C-alpha cells in the first residue's frame, strides 16, 4: 500500500497564527503544512524554515500564518498537494511510492543471472568451480594483493584471519567501541580477549591514541574498522603496531572501494576482511573475502578454511579447521558485481555529494567529515544529530522518518554497553563512541535511489529538525 499522509495534520487555515502553525508542523511527519483559505482551497504552503524567516523579519508569534506562506510547489523536496475539483486538499504527493525508501538494497543489473545459469547448467554449484577462483583472482588484483580467499560471510572472514595468525587464548585483540558485533565476536571465537577502545571524532573509527594506551604485553592484534565506508586513520595505527609486533587485521566489511592515500582499504595492514552481504556495495547474497600479503599465512588460512585438510593429502587433517567456503553460485554473482563496481562507487559518491549539499549549513546535523587523503566509499550515508540543539532523540527521529516513508537505521550500539561485552571495557572511557551511537543514524543510500528521493529525505529531515528548533524558539 502507498504511504498515506493525513490531510488534517498537514493543513492550517489562513486564520491560524504562526505559533499554531509551529505546533502543527512539529506533530506531522513531513513537518510541512498547506494553508487553506476560508473556502478550504489551498493557497500556499509553510515549512518551519518559512516561519523562522518570518520571525526574523519581525513577525510576532501571533501573526497570521500567511506572513510565512510560500507558493505551492516551492521547495526542492517534491512534496505537492493533491487537490479535488474544488481545489481543496485531498491528499499529498511525494517521491515515495508503494513502499518506504529503503536504507539499502542490491543492484543486480549485470551478468548475475547469466553467470548463475552457467553454474546450474554445468552442475558447478558448490564451493568447487571456476567462478570462485575467478572472483578471488579479480578481487586480489583490484586490491593489489597476492592472496584473496573467498569465504561464506564477513564474520568468518574475521575469524579465519585471526586464526591464520595464531590468535588464541591468552592473547588480547584491540577493537573499536563503535562497530558491528561481528568484529568483537570473531575475537571471542578464537578464545582471545577483546579490548575495547574509543573512536576518533573525525573518522568515527579507532582512535590511535586510545589504541596505543590499551596495549599490553598480551596484545597480539588490532582490528581497525573502516566504518560505513570511511577509512580509519591507518598510518599511526600501523606504525604503532609495527613497533610493538602487533598484527593489523582490517575490518573492511563496509569499505569495498574505500582508499587511504590511494591504497585500497583492506590492503594496508597485514590482512583485510570484507563482507558481501546483500546490503553491501557489492554482494554475493551472503559471503566475504580475506586478503593476505604473507604467503605462509595465506596458505594456512586456505587450509583452515577447508576443514584443516592437508592440500596435498586429501582427507588428512593437520589441524581442526572450519567449513568457511563460498559456493560457485555466490562467486558467480560476485564476479558480475565486480564488473559493475566502478559505477556503484561513482553513484555512492554522487549520493553522498547530494546529501552533503542539502545538509550544508544545518548546524544540528553532523555529516561525515572530509579528511585529506581519506577516500570514503560512502557505503551508507550516516549523520549525527546534536541533541543539545534538537529536542528529539534519535529513535523518535527514526520513527518520524518511517512514518514519512523513509527507512533509516540507528548507528551501532556501543560494544561496551551490551551484556556480552561489558567485561572487555576495563576502566576506559568512550565519550566519542557514546555520543555518536546515541545520536547517529544512517539514511537511504542504495545505488538505485533517485535524486528526487534524496531531496525528499534530506528535505524532510531538515524540516523535522527545524520544527523542533522553531517550537523551542517560540516557547522561549
Image (spheres, rainbow, N blue to C red):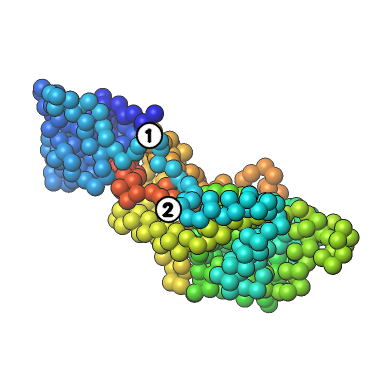
Q: Which numbered circle lies on residue 358?
A: none
Q: Is residue 161 left or right of residue 104?
A: right
Q: Is residue 195 above or below residue 410?
A: below
Label 2 sits on residue: 447
The residue tagged 1 is 98
Residue at position x 73%, y 69% in the image: 298
The one nearer the camera, 126 or 393, is 126
Measured as percent of width and height from the top left, residue 447 is found at 42, 53
User: Which residue does the image show at 38% across and 34% down from the upper left?
Assistant: 98
Q: Name the residue rendered at 18%, 36% in the picture.
A: 45
Whether 310 is drawn above or below 111: the answer is: below
Tag 1 secondary structure: loop
In front here: 365 or 224? Answer: 224
Q: Of residues 181 and 51, which is closer to you in this image?
A: 181
* Residue 232 coordinates in the image, percent (x, y): 54, 65
In percent of width and height, residue 201 lies at: 49, 60
Lower position in the chain sequence, tag 2 or tag 1:
1
Amino acid at each position: 500500500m502507498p504511504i498515506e499522509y493525513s490531510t488534517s495534520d498537514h493543513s492550517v487555515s489562513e486564520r491560524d497564527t504562526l505559533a499554531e502553525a509551529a505546533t502543527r508542523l512539529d506533530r506531522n511527519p513531513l513537518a510541512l503544512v498547506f494553508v487553506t483559505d476560508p473556502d478550504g482551497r489551498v493557497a500556499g504552503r509553510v515549512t518551519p524554515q518559512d516561519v523562522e524567516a518570518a520571525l526574523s523579519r519581525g513577525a510576532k508569534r501571533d501573526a497570521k500564518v500567511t506572513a510565512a506562506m510560500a507558493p505551492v510547489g516551492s521547495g526542492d523536496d517534491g512534496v505537492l498537494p493533491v487537490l479535488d475539483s474544488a481545489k481543496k486538499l485531498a491528499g499529498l504527493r511525494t517521491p515515495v511510492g508503494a513502499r518506504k525508501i529503503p536504507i539499502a538494497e542490491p543492484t543486480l543489473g549485470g551478468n548475475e543471472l547469466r553467470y548463475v545459469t552457467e553454474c546450474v547448467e554445468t552442475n558447478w554449484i558448490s564451493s568447487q568451480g571456476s567462478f570462485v577462483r575467478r572472483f578471488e583472482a579479480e578481487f586480489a588484483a583490484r586490491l593489489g594483493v597476492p592472496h584473496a580467499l573467498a569465504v561464506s560471510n564477513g564474520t568468518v572472514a574475521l575469524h579465519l584471519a585471526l586464526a591464520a595468525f595464531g590468535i588464541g587464548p591468552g592473547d588480547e585483540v584491540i577493537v573499536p567501541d563503535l562497530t558491528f558485533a561481528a568484529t568483537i565476536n570473531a575475537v571471542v571465537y578464537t578464545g582471545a580477549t577483546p579490548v575495547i577502545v574509543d573512536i576518533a571524532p573525525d573518522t568515527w573509527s579507532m582512535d590511535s591514541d586510545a589504541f596505543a594506551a590499551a596495549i599490553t604485553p598480551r596484545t597480539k592484534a588490532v582490528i581497525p574498522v573502516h566504518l560505513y565506508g570511511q577509512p580509519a586513520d591507518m598510518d599511526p595505527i600501523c606504525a604503532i603496531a609495527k613497533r610493538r609486533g602487533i598484527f593489523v587485521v582490517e575490518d573492511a566489511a563496509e569499505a569495498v572501494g574505500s582508499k587511504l592515500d590511494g591504497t585500497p582499504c583492506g590492503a594496508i595492514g597485514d590482512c583485510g576482511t570484507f563482507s558481501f552481504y546483500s546490503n553491501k556495495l557489492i554482494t554475493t547474497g551472503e559471503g566475504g573475502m580475506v586478503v593476505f600479503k604473507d604467503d605462509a599465512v595465506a596458505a594456512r588460512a586456505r587450509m583452515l578454511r577447508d576443514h584443516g585438510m592437508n592440500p596435498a593429502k586429501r582427507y588428512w587433517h593437520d589441524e581442526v579447521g572450519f567449513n568457511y567456503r563460498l559456493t560457485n553460485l555466490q562467486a558467480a554473482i560476485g564476479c558480475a558485481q565486480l564488473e559493475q563496481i566502478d559505477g556503484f562507487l561513482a553513484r555512492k559518491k554522487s549520493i553522498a555529494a547530494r546529501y552533503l549539499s542539502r545538509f550544508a549549513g544545518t548546524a544540528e546535523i553532523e555529516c561525515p567529515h572530509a579528511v585529506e587523503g581519506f577516500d570514503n566509499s560512502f557505503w551508507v550515508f550516516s549523520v549525527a544529530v546534536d541533541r543539545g540543539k534538537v529536542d528529539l532523540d534519535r529513535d523518535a527521529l527514526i520513527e518520524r522518518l518511517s512514518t514519512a516513508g523513509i527507512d533509516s537505521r540507528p548507528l551501532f550500539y556501543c560494544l561496551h554497553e551490551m551484556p556480552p561485552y561489558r567485561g572487555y571495557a576495563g576502566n576506559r572511557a568512550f565519550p566519542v563512541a557514546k555520543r555518536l551511537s546515541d545520536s547517529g543514524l544512517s539514511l537511504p543510500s542504495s545505488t538505485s535511489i533517485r535524486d528526487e528521493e534524496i531531496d525528499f529525505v534530506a528535505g524532510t529531515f531538515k524540516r523535522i529538525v527545524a520544527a523542533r528548533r522553531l517550537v523551542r524558539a517560540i516557547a522561549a
